[in-house]
Image (cartoon, helix red, strand yellow):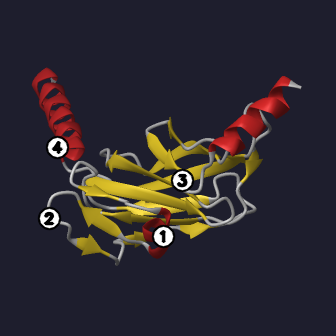
Amino acid sequence: MKLRIKHIAIVLVLGAALQSCFKDVITYTDYRIAILNQTTSGGQTTPATLIDSYAYYVDTTEWAVLSYDDALAGRITNKTTGEVLSQPDVWGTFDSAAEFQTTLHLEQPISMLVVVDPELRLYAYRKYELPENLDQVLTRLTLSSWRASHAASGWQVENDFYTEAEEASADDITQN
């Protein structure tokens, strides 16, 4: 009887161990972004109301967005060869009523994510490495139109239309 209980216990332990070996691995992530706009230094942030987003399955060490016009058109350029890609691997979805308005469904180990705000004429990009077994990432991105460029939570934000007068004006507003 004791031997039989011991055998049953061994079979149950082996069964549990084998089950964990065959569990599903999640190989995608829904990258969800709450995008906020800030038009003055130290000013209030407001949810973005119109955003384009996309991803290429490339590395930002080799590829770049060269201008606002390229970002708006969905174009990236290889830093070494000058090759241009203009068909993103993933287009994001946008829902202005949601807290996390933009979603990119990513399925490759490395991605270059791009966000474009046509109202403020800003764009942002970043490298993203797909984690294993993480089906959703929630993050925030603040686009500050009163600055020429800035880094924000792993993003590089660019304002090709920035003028020094804008930043000086923004500084005057916050000092008064």
Question: Which residue is the site of mark 2?
Answer: 81
Identity, as a three-letter code, of the amino acid under mark 1: Asp
Position in image of residue 59 (x %, y %): 25, 53
- Disc with the residue nearer the chain's start (2 vs 3): 3
Question: Which residue is the site of mark 4?
Answer: 18
Around disc 2, counting alpha carbons within 10 Å, would you say few (fewer than 14), some (14 to 19), or many (20 or more)? few
- Disc with the residue nearer the chain's start (1 vs 2): 1
SS at circle 4: helix
Count of labels in the image: 4
- Disc with the residue nearer the chain's start (1 vs 4): 4
- Disc with the residue nearer the chain's start (4 vs 2): 4
Image check: 131 left or right of 72? left
- Which label was assigned to residue 163? none
Instruction: Give the residue drawn at x 51%, y 59%.
Output: 115
Instruction: Give the residue drawn at x 15%, y 58%.
Output: 80
Instruction: Give the residue drawn at x 22%, y 57%.
Output: 79
Frontmost of labels 4 and 2 is: 2
Frontmost of labels 1 and 3 is: 1
Image check: 105 left or right of 13? right
Q: Is residue 27 visible?
A: no
Q: Is residue 103 above or below residue 159?
A: below
